[in-house]
Amino acid sequence: MTLFFTVATTNYLPFAVSLLDSVKKYHPDFEFCICLADYITDDEIERNNLMNKYPIVQLHELGVDEFDFITQNYNPMQLANCSKVLFAKYFLDQVHINQVIFCDSDTFFFGPLPKSTVNDHEIILSPHFTQPPSIDMKRQELEVLNAGLYNGGFFKLRKSPQTFKYLAWLRERSVKECIYDFKRGYYGEQLWLNLVPLYFKETFIERNEGVNVAYWNLHEREISEVDGSFFVNNITPLSFFHYSGWDYFAPEEISKWALFTSEMRPEIKPLLLKYHEALQANEYEHYINKPNYYTSKNNLNKKSFFSTLKKKYFKR
């Protein structure tokens, strides 16, 4: 059995539900789960239609040793990113689950995954891009040299001895040091992924151009629409688009980090507007300002508070 999961905080539930709705359309045979890097009561889940739509597993239910550290020291993004490996291990430990497929919650499907992605390989990673940009866009290359060759927003893991070795390796390195410090060689869990094809020989690099299309690979991927279906470079069916850096309140702009504008790439607009409609239907504006149960009162927040006081009262 294949389990498809995403990790979200409560304010990102509309993203998570929109994603799973889109995947279910093309892969109704998958099982689905929203993994919550947050805490909400069973009563609140029971009374809420959006929370009832898919099974929810909360971080505290895993019973992991790292729980106190990560909930006390991370911001919401760090908490979500470091817990991917914890949830993946939790699911693969279950007898009836043969493999897991993960996507960041800010992705949306426009077609099925390639059959080989679903049916083959033990570990699948997605590169940010596979073709060099022009020299005037070399910033894209510099960014991945800093942030990692592979995007942590998508992976597939099939149950095997090698996969469990990979999860143990990544867990030791990334869960308690899911920090962002370029000078010290940290970018969440993502920089560690550079080493995975070297250490784990069954790793497959998914080069299909319809997988994980995003602002960082638009230099090599053009979108076209034929009879309501989307294609990449007029050949490859679009599986899913990753909306990293996209702003709900400026829905026609691709991303705050993109080198392309929507005026330069008007064929992207239908993807942006469809996503906006999905988030509207799933109550984005109702949820987006909900605080994270853990991070709103943890050590990171306290440090920020005392840092603000220090700057205010001890100016030089």
Image (tube, helix red, strand yellow):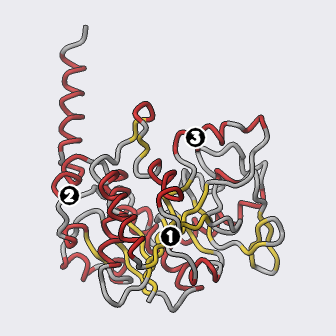
Q: Secondary structure at mark 3?
A: helix
Residue 122 to residue 291: above or below: below
Work out how far the residue at label 1 is from the one at label 3, CA to CA, in angstroms: 22 Å
The answer to whether the residues at label 2 and label 3 have Cβ atoms under 8 Å apart is no
Callout 2: 10 Å neighbours few (<14), some, many (20+)?
few
Q: Which mark is residue 123?
A: 1
User: Is residue 311 shown left or right of residue 281?
Assistant: left
- Position of 54 with respect to 249 (left or right) is left
Q: Which mark is residue 145?
A: 3
Q: Nearer the viewer, mark 1 or mark 2?
A: 1
Q: In the rendering, which numbered label is found on residue 65?
A: none
- Identified by mark 3, the residue type is Leu
Q: Which of 171/197 is in front? A: 197
28 vs 228, nearest the viewer: 28
Tell me whether the residue at label 1 lies in contact with that at label 2, contact meaning CB atoms closer than 8 angstroms: no
**37, 228: nearer the viewer:** 37
The percent position of residue 290, horizontal first and vertical second, equals 31, 58
Amino acid at dot 2: Glu
Residue at mark 2: 66
Amino acid bearing label 1: Ile
Which of pointers 2 and 3 lies earlier in the amino acid sequence?
2
Q: Position of residue 256 (x, y in %)?
A: 58, 45
Alpha carbons under labels 1 and 2: distance apart: 24 Å
| Residue at image location 60% in from the left, 85% down from the top | 26
Image location of residue 311, percent across then percent down: 24, 20
> Badge 3 local density, few (<14 within 10 Å), some, or many (20+)?
few
* Cα–Cα span, label 2 and label 3: 29 Å
In the structure shown, which secondary structural element does the residue marked by tag 1 occupy?
A: strand
Residue drawn at (38%, 75%) of the image = 161
Of badges 1 and 3, the one in the foreground is: 1
- Relative to 33, say whether 134 is above or below: above
Q: Where the C terminus falls, by quadrant? A: top left
